[in-house]
Image: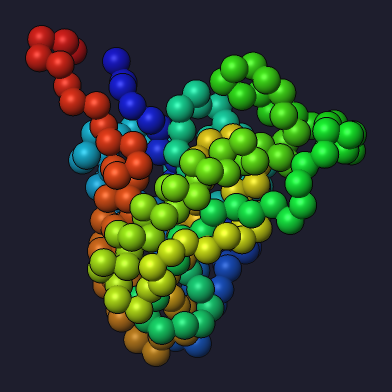
Amino acid sequence: MHVGPVVVIDPGHGGTDTGARGSSGLVEKDVVLQVGKILRAELERMGYRVVMTRNDDSNPSYEDRAALANAYRDAIFLSLHVSSTGATGNTRAYFYQFPVPFQATDTSLLSNVVKQGSGTAIPWEEAQRPFAEQSRRLANLVQIELMHRFSQSPNAPTPAAVRNLRSVAAPAVAVEISSVSVSDPIALTSLSGLFAASIARGIAAFRPMPTPVPGLP
């Protein structure tokens, strides 16, 4: 029986949505899929169960990506991105920041709801709000690991209205590395393993895998 959280890896963009595109031919959708597969292997090696929102050059909707995470009772959501500009190796973790406080009288938001594990219905567009503090903590732990390995990175995560995170009813962060504007693609792609390992260590600091009990399957 699986014990511990399910990590949902979300390689951004895909299909006709290439994301950021560099003059060297690098496109964001390809880089993040490569990083996602490396991250999946690293997390599975550590004992986590991992699913990906896409394993190929497809482009699930924001709602489909969130629905995949929301289908699990105990999930952690990681959305992967590459910036269009910036110094090579600059890395940032983001957590969702809502622009205004939620008002229970905002009936326009109640037409589509997501059920939390407790069975409580919350508006789909507000699904991330109950997890804001957990997401901030996760982003902080991931950013600490990134900063240790990528010296140009900030020492604190960034609050932002990242669309991929808004409808996820679980701790959720977006992580971005710079950038597709490099003249030599290898300068960026060679960092994929270190980038993925840093993210995995941040997840492990947030939710360590339980220690197996001798004699139990």
Q: Position of residue 40 (x, y in %)?
A: 33, 46
The residue positioned farthest toward the top in the image shown: 215
Q: Residue at x 16, y 10 (%)?
A: 216
Q: How is the image coloured?
A: rainbow
- Reply above or below: 24 against 83: below
Q: Residue at x 21, y 40 (%)?
A: 45
**Residue 47 in sight here:** yes
The residue positioned farthest toward the left in the image shown: 214
Q: Position of residue 114 (x, y in %)?
A: 69, 28
- Reply above or below: 121 against 26: above
Would residue 183 be found to the left or right of residue 128 on screen?
A: left
Would residue 94 be found to the left or right of residue 4 on screen?
A: right
Q: Residue at x 49, y 41 (%)?
A: 134
Q: Position of residue 152 (x, y in %)?
A: 35, 79
- Reply above or below: 31 against 45: below
Q: Position of residue 148 (x, y in %)?
A: 26, 66
Residue 148 or 29: which is nearer the viewer?
Answer: 148
- How many numbered discs, if any? 0
Q: Residue at x 54, y 54 (%)?
A: 95
Q: Quadrant of the N terminus?
A: top left
Residue 83 or 153: which is nearer the viewer?
Answer: 153
Residue 202 or 87: which is nearer the viewer?
Answer: 202
Q: Quadrant of the C terminus?
A: top left
**Residue 57 in sight here:** no
- Reply above or below: 140 against 41: below
